[in-house]
Amino acid sequence: MSTPEKHNFQAEIAQLLDIVIHSLYTDKEIFIRELISNAADATEKLRFLQAAGTPIFEPDRELKISVNTDDTAHTIAIADAGIGMTRDELVENLGTIAHSGSKAFLQQIKENAGNPNIIGQFGVGFYSAFMVATKVTVYTRSHQPEDTGWVWTSDGVSSYEIEAGVDLPRGTKIVISLKDDDKEYATASRVEGIIKQYSNFVGFPIELNGTAVNTINAIWTRSKSELTDSDYEEFYKFIGHDIDGPQYRFHFSADAPLAINALLFVPKRSLERPGMPKSELEVQLYCRRILIQSKAKGLLPEWLRFLKGVVDSEDLPLNISRETMQDSALLQKLNKVLTGRFLKFLDEEAKGDAEKYTTFFKEFGHFLKEGIVSDFAHRDALAKLLRYETSVAEAPCGLADYVSRLPEGQNEIYYLIGQNRGACLASPYYEGLKAKGFEALFLYDPWDEFVMDHLREFDGKKLVAAEKAEIALEAPESKLDEAAVRLLCNFIKETLGDKVDEVKPSTRLVDSPAAVVEGDAQMTSSMRRIMKSMNRDGENPFKHNLEINPNHPMLVGLDGAREARPAVSKQIAEQLYDNALISAGLMEDPQAMLKRINSLLEQLVTAEKSVGKKAKPSETAKPAATQGAKRSKGENAKGEKAPATPPK
Ligand code: ADP
Ligand code: MG
């Protein structure tokens, strides 16, 4: 037997060990993660060599990781059947700073001098064992058939010893003699919790004192053909803490530009509720099956925070700091690839099963809308995923469908914001489009206003609010001449005063007597409604206009009544405006309006009564109103024409 040979650690390692040992770092338990990670790496490498046909010592040894605790001797041992280390490799790997993780760590330490917390952001790999150890012994036997075993020992101060080991099995076993303060790591229950937390998806069996602990393995690294629906479902329920299965699953692997295995799930339901804090992205980031971060912020854009799952990239350095990682170029690259692929996946799903996609969109559409508003890079891809009802389609359809149906002469995409389908169909803003045979998107979510505002166009077609659509219907034969219309507009403007900026004749109203239209090009009624609801309207400098339909019997009647019965005409002008506000969803306090309606109704019944006996001459004098009434369609006109229309 050889005598132990003493070596001094390279200066940098000694420095590193000094920091590790004297740190006040509380999450010491990560040393288990680090050692299991190394064991898994070594096993992974062995599997690779074996697959490549390299001759291997003890080729039949099972590829598993064994953890053993001894709470009498106060030790914990972690053993693998991986590639092991030769004597030279021991010196190189455990005695010098050749490998990247620790190098980066030291670099950080230098930049953050005097900050002991820095260690918490790092896995310092093998050396983290010295946080809890009085002594670390490494028994190792290389996979190379001609080699022999070696034993490496150190107290982590300044030196280590190497001697020959006899009859060691292939692989590496690391035995840690625990400090008095850290004896908890010799307790099976404590260690089991840690292994479960960090290493549940390590691709090799992990046994603790002879019992398997990681039941679920890294299914995202397996090929799709090997996996069943229930494999996926079980895995989702486990990582998603969900009792339901997922709505969608997206399993993909790529080699370029990055090596990625990703398994992402969309839950059936969104857990985020309005008024509640935003949920956190629950996608775990792995590097070669070792968990790096369980809620990997920055891995996906915030608007994809409803996703759950696992992303594993071999290109990530395992020992990367969480803080540096968050804005690392690598993470951004991952983010870009994953987001692009996921959006493509959704697009394909939407095309493949529209109904299923509609269900998804109902639940998660607002996240996509958030993306459109906040994430310029993905705006176009997201726009394709929007689904809306339209005047033509009762089942929600995409903007591309809408565009594919564009009739000759229509070069813009029109949208209308309303409470529901009925309200949109009845909206005065829809009348002109309908008369032209143009389709309109019906948007029932007030936030769609912002979505449209950010999108501005789709497929080269401008998105235009229906109320801003420049639609000129062929003017029907006018009931009032130009001068009369001008006087009528003046009368209404005088009556309404500051409430409106301008009163002008409309070119696109068909059934409605009037509509409010925002004067500012960027503003729409629904935008104003949102601003009102956010109490931002107080100082709103934009006034709106009232557009009137001079051919509507009510307006024709009003023209006739304006001089003869100024009091009731004023009430009618005011009611005309209020009705337009209601149509636009802008009526705030209906109390004044109710008083007015009651007064109008009162006048109506009194008039009817007196007509029954003897009609007042002034009330019957104007034939214009009756003339207009012939044109009117539906109930709409009935109620409105009453005050100004004398019975025959
Ligand atoms: P890293 O894992 O980032 O390389 P570590 O400090 O964790 O850094 O490990 C240093 C090196 O020691 C590893 O790169 C590997 O070559 C070697 N090593 C550590 N543990 C094992 C093991 N269980 N089997 C074989 N080699 C190992
Ligand atoms: Mg390591």
Image (tube, rainbow, N blue to C red):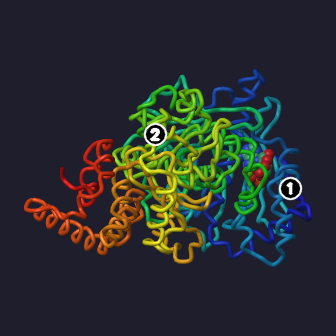
Going 73% across and 29% down the picture, which residue do you hit? Answer: 48
Q: Amino acid at mark 1?
A: Gly
Residue at 27%, 43% (x, y): give it.
Answer: 634
Mark 2 lies on a secondary structure that is: loop
Label 1 secondary element = helix
Alpha carbon distance from label 2 to label 1:
94 Å
Spot occupied by residue 644 in the image (x, y as percentages of width and height): 27, 59
Q: Which residue is mark 1?
A: 95
Q: Residues within 10 Å of mark 1 (few under 14, many from 20)?
A: some
Q: Residue furthest left?
A: 613
Residue at the spot of label 2: 476
* Residue 63 vertical position relative to residue 363 in the rendered view, above or below: above
Judged left or right of residue 81, residue 145 is right
First in sequence: mark 2 or mark 1?
A: 1
**Front position in the image: 237 or 472:** 472
The image quarter containing residue 632 is top left
Classify mark 2 as within 8 Å of ligand 1 or not, answering yes or no.
no
